[in-house]
Image: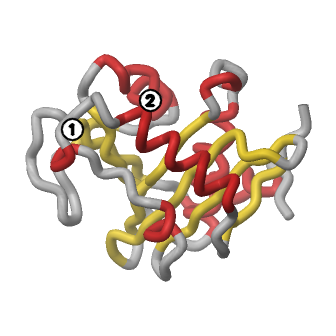
Amino acid sequence: MSIIIEQVVTARPALAAFLEAHHADMEDTAPPESRHALPFDRLLVPGVRLFAAFTEGRPVATGALASVDEEHEEVKSMRTDPAMRGRGLGRTMLDFLLADAAARGIRRVSLETGSMDFFAPARALYASAGFTECGPFGRYRPDPLSTFMTLALPAASVASDAAEVGTR
């Protein structure tokens, strides 16, 4: 299976549908005020870098980086096609995002994910990449339905990994 990861800068119907399914997956996990996924149009604004992994022309994974401040970004919209889970796509996308951030001089990457069982695999993925729990950051406020995690980036050691993932 050949995977191509590319930055998305314009709207694409298939990708919009992929991310709408992401929102639908989370709809029953928490009330609206505790769901922080960005809608597709807000992933295409300045200060956000949206990436999608494609195989055979269809989106199979997404991830984005949103600016928190000059050297701090947030992982947003991590999603793997449910039919493709367990194949390492989430790890590939996360590694790609971290390499992209490090290559641009970002020193810290943080994220918010749910604290419910539905999000246990996501929390395990992030922990296995070195993320540790932290308090709310940016505009977030304490929420028992949220888990906040962060990772300090050693820019020089992570940036070289970006070349290992195919991009176009």
**Callout 2 environment at 10 Å: few (<14), some (14 to 19), or many (20+)?**
some
In this view, the residue in front, 17 or 165, is 17
> How far apart, in angstroms, are the residues tagged by discs 1 and 2?
12 Å
Instruction: Say left or right for 3 vs 96.
Output: right
Up the image or down, 20 lies above or below 41; here it is above
| Mark 1 lies on residue | 146
Is residue 3 shown left or right of residue 124? right
Compared across the picture, whether 95 is left or right of 128 comes to right
Residue 130 placement (x, y as % from top left): 45, 36
Q: Mark 2 points at which residue?
A: 122
Above or below: residue 161 compared with residue 147: below
Front in this rendered view, residue 109 or 90: 90
Mark 2: secondary structure: helix
Drawn side of residue 35 relative to residue 91, left or right:
left
Name which residue lies at 24% across and 28% down. 115
**Image coords of residue 98 (percent x, y):** 57, 53
Q: Which residue type does callout 1 highlight?
A: Ser
**Amino acid under label 2?**
Ala
Residue 38 visible in the shown view? yes
